[in-house]
Image (cartoon, helix red, strand yellow):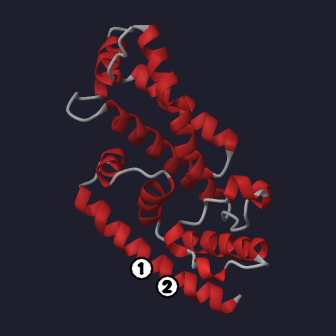
Amino acid sequence: MQTQSDETLMAGILERDARAFEVLFERYADALHRHVGFMLHDEAAAHDVVQEAFLRVWLRAEQWDGRGAPRAWLYRIATNLALNHLRTVQRRHEVPLELPPDADGDEDMAGFVPAWMIDNATLGPEAVVERSEQRMCYRLAMARLPEEKREVFRMVHELEMSLRDAADALNIPEGTVKSRLHYARRQLARDWRELEAGS
């Protein structure tokens, strides 16, 4: 059986085809959960955001104009919902800067700090301690970034999205993605050096 394109599935959803909706859900639910999970650091909230994103796809399928990729539209919905959640949380209380409870597990966090920010020459007998400190510095530096720059950085470096896909997901020009990414890299590198110097 030939795999249906996202566009074909969206056409089915517009006709209230439940099977087309199920296929689209199965195709993207896990990836979307990882995407919003990086943003929220809260499994329950990430689950809720993904469910809400797909509910909106089902209820408002006509809002997809057919010009962009359905995947980018879906990511944009989930990203906006996740950002709305973060804003709500921040209004209630300050978001803690501590690492999440499971952050001590190297297998989950091993790739958390982008390779370009780690000086491999520093890894020695005390690598575990150093990596833990690097992760903490990274999280603190990320928390200092403006929200829109932080999100672009995460999409490109943590989710390994292309600049084009990130631009589509955020509904902004690719040039804006490049600009935000450049700013984020410079700011992170500067804050990273300051945090390491102070540790």
Please provide percent x and percent y for residue 33: 57, 38
Disc 1 is placed on an element classified as helix
Q: Specify the amino acid type for callout 2.
A: Arg
Q: Which mark is residue 186?
A: 1
190 relative position to 67: left or right = right
Crowding around mark 1 (Cα neighbors within 10 Å: few <14, some 14 to 19, many 20+) is: few
Please tell me in which quadrant of the rendered image residue 197 appears: bottom right
Please tell me in which quadrant of the rendered image residue 199 appears: bottom right
**Residue 167 higher or lower than 73, as above or below:** below
Q: Specify the amino acid type for callout 1.
A: Arg
Q: Observer-nearest residue: 2 or 84?
A: 2
**Residue 174 higher or lower than 143, as above or below:** above
Q: Observer-nearest residue: 18 or 30?
A: 30
Return the residue found at the far left: 67
Q: Are marks 1 and 2 in contact (CB under 8 Å)?
A: yes
**Residue 124 higher or lower than 194, as above or below:** above
Disc 2 is placed on an element classified as helix
Q: Quadrant of the N terminus?
A: top left
Question: Residue at horizontal 49%, vertical 85%?
Answer: 190
Q: CA distance from mark 1 to mark 2?
A: 6 Å
Please provide percent x and percent y for residue 46: 61, 41
Q: Observer-nearest residue: 146 or 20?
A: 20
Q: Give the residue at mark 2.
A: 190
Question: Residue at horizontal 42%, vertical 20%?
Answer: 59
**Residue 27 higher or lower than 104, as above or below:** above
Question: Residue at horizontal 44%, vertical 27%?
Answer: 56
Please provide percent x and percent y for residue 53: 48, 32
Q: Observer-nearest residue: 46 or 33?
A: 33
Question: Residue at horizontal 65%, vertical 52%?
Answer: 41
Please provide percent x and percent y for residue 98: 73, 67
